[in-house]
Image (spheres, grey):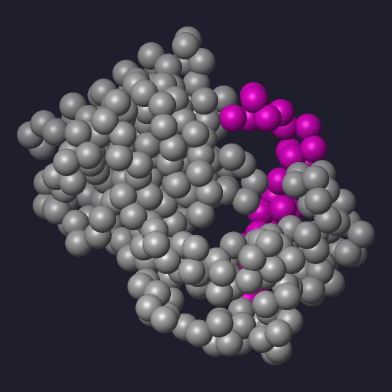
Amino acid sequence: MTKPRKIPEVNFPNRQQKSFEFEIIDNRKMLLHDIPTDHNPFRPHRLRFYAILFIRQGEGIHFIDFKKYNYQRGSIVFIAKEQVHAFEKNLDRKASFLLFTETFLERSSLGSNLMQQLSLYNYHLHHPILQLTEEEFPIFSSIVNRIEKEFQGVDDFATEEIIQSSLKIFLCLAERIRKKNTGAQPQSIYRDEFKEFQKLLKQNLLKNRKVNFYADSMQMSTKKLNRITKEIMNQPAKTYISEYLTLEIKRFLMNTNLSIKEIAYQTGFEDPTNFVKFFKKHSNRTPAEFRKQHHTLV
């Protein structure tokens, strides 16, 4: 059996065009692979930074965390740090790809704690694509044009600050539209508590997946934690935890060369048989079937 290859983990590119952690790449360079990287952007790779794909023209598909997402003119695709994604070779697409780190925004008071306030990159909570209306599209297009012009030009007074503030405006306007589209009724009530729950999950998921552990950690009853997840995610806490864990297992399967048995132990299962049963229940495939199916993509 062919040994699965790891999905490349991509750190922020160091191309020396600018000294700060931001870059913008147009679609032509992506299609021609005219970017100095050691990975293929058209095959799955895991980002160690944040990204935005702004679609100016065309329709197509973008791959994020083993799912296909359709886009069209006016789509904004948000790719979060740690997510696995891949580009589609699309000759008809015109797009800009913006790359940045949290440090880039937080280095300025303009972006202090901004990423914590945004729901745009909360991929467990929201669809990764925001669709603009015809009235909204020119506003975002002009901001991206301003960013691109500033980035491609010669360093001048406050170049980094201008890009930072423009990116912040882009993100804040997008957040406003998402809130308007999704509504803020139940989400606003429990938003902070739900984010605390997500933070605890990220820290403890591979060691503990029991609802009462997280409820106790948050000093609340399991009944209240279930009420929070039902209001925000329309599912009980146990289901949300299982879906979260299933995604992490998929990343282990595709991002490591560990055996199924080793992954079972790494993800908190004492019995590999129970691990296989859990994964099959939540993904309709065994871990080996999932790895084999996606092996061809790597």
Bounds of the magenta segment: 178-206
In the rendered image, residue 112, in percent from the top left (x then y), is placed at 44, 46
Q: Nearer the viewer, residue 183 or 165?
A: 183
Left or right side of 16 for 282: right
Q: Is residue 140 magenta?
A: no
* Position above or below: 216 against 16: below
| Residue 183: % across, % down | 71, 28
x 39%, y 39%: residue: 52
Image height of 126 relative to 13, above or below: above
Left or right: where 101 falls relative to 15 = right
Asked whether residue 229 appears in the rendered view, the answer is yes
Q: Which residue is rendered at x = 17% and y = 41% of the image?
A: 32
| Relative depth, front residue between 131 and 293 | 293
Quarter of the picture containing the C terminus is bottom left
Judge by depth and name the residue closer to the eye, 18 or 70: 70
- Residue sitting at 43 percent across and 70 percent down? 255
Q: Where is the N terminus found, in terms of image quarters?
A: bottom left
Kindly identify the residue that appears in the image at 55 percent across and 66 percent down: 290
The location of residue 157, given as percent across then percent down, is: 14, 33
Q: Residue 158: which quarter of the image?
A: top left
